[in-house]
Amino acid sequence: MAPLLEFKNVTKVYSRGLLSRSSTTALNNVSFTLNENEPTIMTVAGESGSGKTTLAMLLLGFINTTAGHILYKGQDISQLRGAERMTFRREVQAVFQDPFAVFNPFYTVDHLLSVPIERFKLARSKTEARDRMAEALNAVGLRPEDILGRFPHQLSGGQRQRINVARALVLRPRLLVADEPVSMVDASLRANILETLRALQRNYGVSIIYITHDLTTAYHIARSIVVLYRGNVMEAGDVDSVIKTPQHPYTRLLIDSIPWPDLSRRWGETELKVKEGDIHDRGAGCRFLARCPFAMDKCQAPPPLFRLNGHQAASCYLHEQHPQIEAERLTELLPV
Amino acid sequence: MNPVLHVNDLQVTYYTDAGRAKALDGVTLSLNAGEKLGLVGESGSGKSTMALAMMRMIKPPGRIEGGNVIVDGTDLTRLSDQQMLKARLSKIAYIPQGAMNSLNPVMQIGAQMADAIKAHQPDTSKAELETRSLKALESVDLKRSVSKMYAHELSGGMKQRVCIAIGILLNPKVIIADEPTSALDVVTQRQVMETIDHVQQQLGAAVILIGHDMGLMAQFVDKVAVMYAGRIMELSSVREMFTDPKHPYAQALINSLPNLENKGVFQGIPGLAPSLLRLPGGCAFHPRCPMVMEVCKTARPKIDTLPGGRQVQCHLYAERV
């Protein structure tokens, strides 16, 4: 079973300041593996500042790691050159949050779809290029005759976001990074886009890393989930277990804060301890310490991951009766 | 109880090069003091236009074509521009969608708050300006030190709470919150909503919450109005809306909600929201409606009041003669 993508103890530190250097750890020792012949959907969840977008940027090769390696098909992505780099660029695609900002308003939609085809020489003739564009649009549930030749402003947000997915699809990717793809789309259109992503995984064998702060959509689309808080993995595992029986106090807080459209389920069972903006801990301990209702003395030291069962792990001393698991082996608990 | 807000047959039209777009088409609703109303709908359904029209902040090419907005006995649509300036914030306050973009980046928070009070009550003393703005900050759970800070020093949730603090400075009777949490994380969202809830109880004001997150509505409001193409399709109590929606569009909206039981079932609403420039005749929802009848294509349904005070705009419930 060949790994498609491996994160090996990846850490990213942003430094700033010329004289007094201060640094922020955006991602701390994150490891996971996606396999080549088992396409899956993995969610990376967390609030703003949790490092989820940093993870996407690292994975796409836009920024370099401070420590650790990211391997694509066994090769470090920062070492890729020439033809190999082009293959990586083609096979790893992204869909970003804002469906309005990625379009050039001066060109028709055809431009967005035809540029990658020309760039990667995927078609030998104009008709073939057109066929590929049509095929990709059909795959995301759009009618090519409605879309081709139109300008971005003539399309709705949901249509644009699906065109972004189609653009990625034209390149026959192996891995798709979707960074908050539905957060700017109307609730009634979200379902369509999520359904499109899932069909992509099922019918085209594309693995998807779904980055979001919305645990409701994560629950519905993903198989596995990694919950990040300020760069650290708080809890990870099977999406059903993590969302239905969260074990880390942070995950509990997140899930408790989801406004469920359900009248029998009242909001906010757990009290919010510290308001955001009051957190000044610079210590080495658990990142969630200042907001944690169960904070203990030993939380001053960084908690390791504890393996709760075959498909769930949490980084919290509340679960220290369970065996520890090294960060590198976290993947074993993530179902595909 | 006398309603504190009464919107009667409000009409707003945008005159564009491509034609007239009726963004609000005869919206009627009323709200008692202390009540919370949720206004939901897809983009383009007229939610934000509704908020702007109530504040009389519709800019050309848009125009309020008819109807009244009566707050606490005063008809806002009949006030002069000067009087309307005074009425904003003191009678009706608006909490905008992107709080991050609505604060002045080169002015301290406290000075911005003082500005708002001075605009209405020019002879307020300096000491009183300060006590009042500090009190407002405290009521939204922010520290006093925030008044000496600039917008860039605050997080998104704190900025949104500053906007709420500015909104309640002059004890308005009606607070309109236009997607106040759409750019925030879930935990911060909960803090902001708890803050709005808290200040609303203090002031006894009526709140209109605009948004498309039905989950948030279920947790926060008392009544829900579902808008489509500039019309209120259904107006019910939150319980009735979630357990027994009447209008087919409201039913589709409720059914499209994700929950823990129906994992992996995505039920979108087929079709697209209509363009306001080319609204279908009759009921605006009829091309997407699963229960469409002949009459829906030609005649626009009237607002029917069902037992219990629910309002529905649909031929299915028209009184049979």
Image: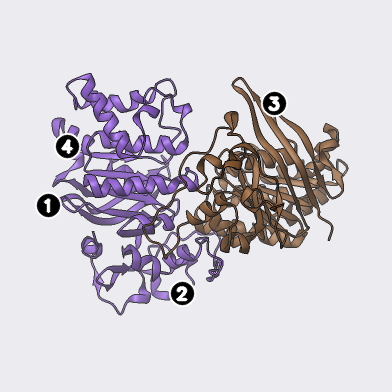
Chain colours: A purple, B brown
Q: Residues within 10 Å of mark 3 (few under 14, many from 20)?
A: few
Task: State how far apart marks 4 and 3 are (Cα).
Answer: 55 Å
**Residue annotated with mark 4:** A80
Image point (45%, 51%), residue name: A48
**Residue annotated with mark 1:** A2
**Residue annotated with mark 2:** A294
- Determine which quarter of the picture holds residue B206: bottom right
**Residue annotated with mark 3:** B60
Looking at the image, the residue that sits furthest to the left is A1
Q: Quadrant of the N terminus of chain A?
A: bottom left
- Badges 1 and 3, same chain: no
Residue type indicated by callout 3: Pro
Image point (69%, 38%), residue name: B25
Position in image of residue B170 (x %, y %): 79, 50
- Determine which quarter of the picture holds residue B136: bottom right
Q: Are marks 4 and 3 in contact (CB under 8 Å)?
A: no
Q: Nearer the viewer, mark 4 or mark 3?
A: 3
Q: Nearer the viewer, mark 3 or mark 2?
A: 3
Looking at the image, the residue that sits furthest to the front is B321
Seen from the viewer's position, the closer of residues B155 and B305 is: B305
